Amino acid sequence: MTEYLKRFSPKQVYVHFLYAVSVLVLYVTGLPIFFPDQLGWILTIMGGAEVTMVIHRIAAVVMAFSVIYFLIYAAIATIIYDKGILKRVLPTPTDIKDLMLDVKYAFGLSGKKPRLPKYGYLEKTEVWIIGVEAVIFIVTGLVLWFPTLFLEFMSLQTVLAFRYIHGAFAVLSLAGFLFHFMNVHMHPEKYPIEMSIFSGDMEKQEAQEEHPKWVEGGQ
C-alpha cells in the first residue's frame, strides 16, 4: 500500500487554487488590454474592453484576497501551532550550496544530488518572487483602478508609469508561471499534472527522493 505524507495543508491547497486561477484570468484579460494590436481579438471574444476590465478587476480582488488570507494564515500558524512555517521559506547559505550541487549534477559534473528539505532553494525562490510580484501588482493595480484618487498627489506621468510597470511585470510573471508549470507538471515522472496541488499529499517514496531532509528530520 502506498504511503503518503501531508505536504500541503487544506488551507494551502485552497489558497494555491484561488491564486492560480485568478492569475490565469488576469493574464487572459490583462495582456490583451496592454497589447491590443496583437491580442485585441481576445477582447472581441470576451465582449469588448469594458467587459474584460470588469472580469480583470474581479480576478484582481480574488488574487489580493488569496495573498492577504495566506499571510494571515501564516501569521496565525506561526504564533499558535507551527513556529517553523516562515523559517522553512527563508533563504539560507545551504540553499546556495544545494543550488551549486544541483547544477553540477545536472551537467554530469557530480553524481551526488543535494539533500533537500521540505522546501528547497527553488521553492523558496518561487515563494519570494510570487510575494514580491503580488505586492507590485496590487499597488500598481490600485493606482490604475483609481487614477483620479492618486492624481491628487501624483503626476499624470507617474500614474502612466505605473501602467507600464504593471504590464511589464505581467509579462515577467507569465514567464515565471510557465517555468513553474514546466518544472512542476511537465516533469517526466509527474506528467501531465502533479496531483499534490489538489490533495496536499505526496508519496513517501517520492518525498524521500526529492526532499530527504524533510522525510528524515521534518525540515
Image (tube, helix red, strand yellow):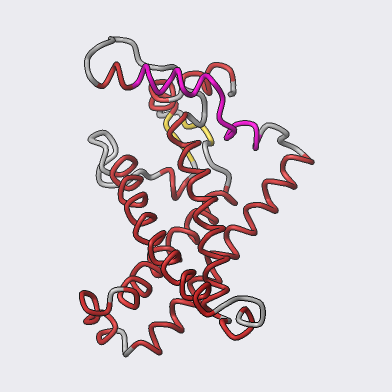
Is residue 164 shown left or right of residue 109?
right
Stretch of the chain drawn in magenta: 85-102
Residue that lies at the very extreme toward the right in this rendered image:
80
Q: Is residue 4 left or right of residue 181?
A: right
The quarter of the displayed image where residue 81 is located: top right
Is 122 magenta? The answer is no
In-front residue for pair 195/87:
87
Q: Main secondary structure of the magenta part?
A: helix
Left or right of 97 in this view: 33: left
Measuring from the top left, give residue 138's x and y in whole percent: 56, 65
Q: Is residue 100 magenta?
A: yes
User: Residue 205: horizontal and vertical position, in percent?
Assistant: 40, 23
Q: Residue at x 44, y 47 (%)?
A: 197
Q: Quadrant of the N terminus?
A: top left
What residue is rendered at 49% in x and 69% in y? Answer: 162
Instruction: Examine the image and state in which quarter residue 8 appears.
Output: top right
For image coordinates 49% across by 76% down, the residue present is 157
The residue lying at 21 percent from left, 82 percent from top is: 41
Give the left or right position of residue 180, taking residue 12 as reference: left
Q: How many numbered discs sit on the rendered protein?
A: 0
